[in-house]
Amino acid sequence: MFLSNAAGYFVLFALFTACVGCGFWQDKAEPGTSIASTEARVTPFSTKEPETYQAEIVITAGGIERRIFTARKGAMRRVDYDFGTSEQKTFLQSEGDYVVSDALKIYAAKSPGKEMPGSTELENDVTDNLLNRRHDTNFENLGRENGISRFRAVPADSDSSESIIFVNDVLGLPVRQEFYSIDPAGQRMLQYTSELRDVRLDVDDALFTVPAKFRKVSMIEFSRMTRLK
């Protein structure tokens, strides 16, 4: 897997994953205060995804970057995996569910109950790590500087991992998270980072439509053609 599930407690989305302008400070702990998070209400920042936004998620591990573009406008959604590369695949949810290859100028409709090709592993990682959080996490307020508040998040049932969460006070959402493993001697090692870039709170409806000149193929054909490319 590109990401490790060992550090799979709260991180955004951008998108992943935070409510803008309402309920941001659910607990106003002073810097250095440890907050035992056993209930959703004590999380010191919002975990609700905005109704309308777009952003680029950059995940870095072992010196390798992977980029994902995400957008939402109400019930409409878009995710571009391997964003900006020839391998980019776009997943759209609007009047229907579609998978799109910009390089091949083709698209396919997703059948109900079927997974889209190539999405499961990374989508699960991003969802788990960028949009969700565990309810048994301890948060420590590390203070605020230049409009960014920092928190240390440690699973209550483990002393072998932690994350540092950077929250943009103006946007009201986490914009960077660093995941560390901790060895028995207490040494911390950075495993990977996830970061939101170019966050916008206005989204063009055109992002959720298949380009008019793209050719429709079956899901089986789409999978075959994108594997051969």
Image: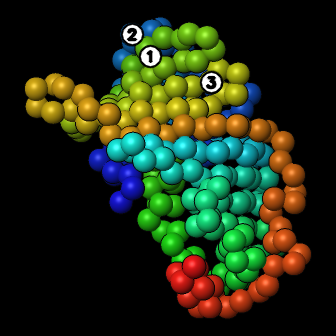
The answer to which of 22 and 51 lies nearer the viewer is: 51
Q: Residue at x 71, y 60 (%)?
A: 78
Determine which residue is flagged by label 2: 32
Please state the horizontal and vertical placement of residue 47, each as a whole percent of the image.
57, 38
Q: Where residue 141 is drawn, which disc sits there?
A: 1
Residue position marked by numbered label 3 in the rendering: 168
Q: Is residue 104 above or below residue 216?
A: above
Q: Is residue 139 above or below residue 223?
A: above
Q: Which percent across, then down, holds residue 15? A: 62, 45
The image quarter containing residue 210 is bottom right
Residue placed at 79% from the left, 39% from the top?
201
Say which quarter of the image contains residue 89: bottom right
Expressed as whole percent of the image width and height from the top left, the position of residue 226 reads: 58, 80
Q: Nearer the viewer, residue 121 or 25?
A: 121
What's the CA distance linking mark 1 and mark 2? 5 Å
The amino acid pointed to by label 2 is Gly
Residue 219 appears left or right of 184:
right
Q: Quadrant of the N terminus?
A: bottom left
Q: Earlier in the sequence, mark 3 or mark 2?
A: 2
Separation of marks 3 and 1 at Cα, in angstroms: 14 Å
Q: Secondary structure at mark 3?
A: strand
Distance between mark 3 and mark 2 Cα atoms: 19 Å
User: In the rendered structure, are the residues bearing label 1 and label 2 in contact, judged by CB atoms less than 8 Å apart?
Assistant: yes
Which residue corresponds to the image point at 79% horizontal and 53% vertical from the top-left?
73
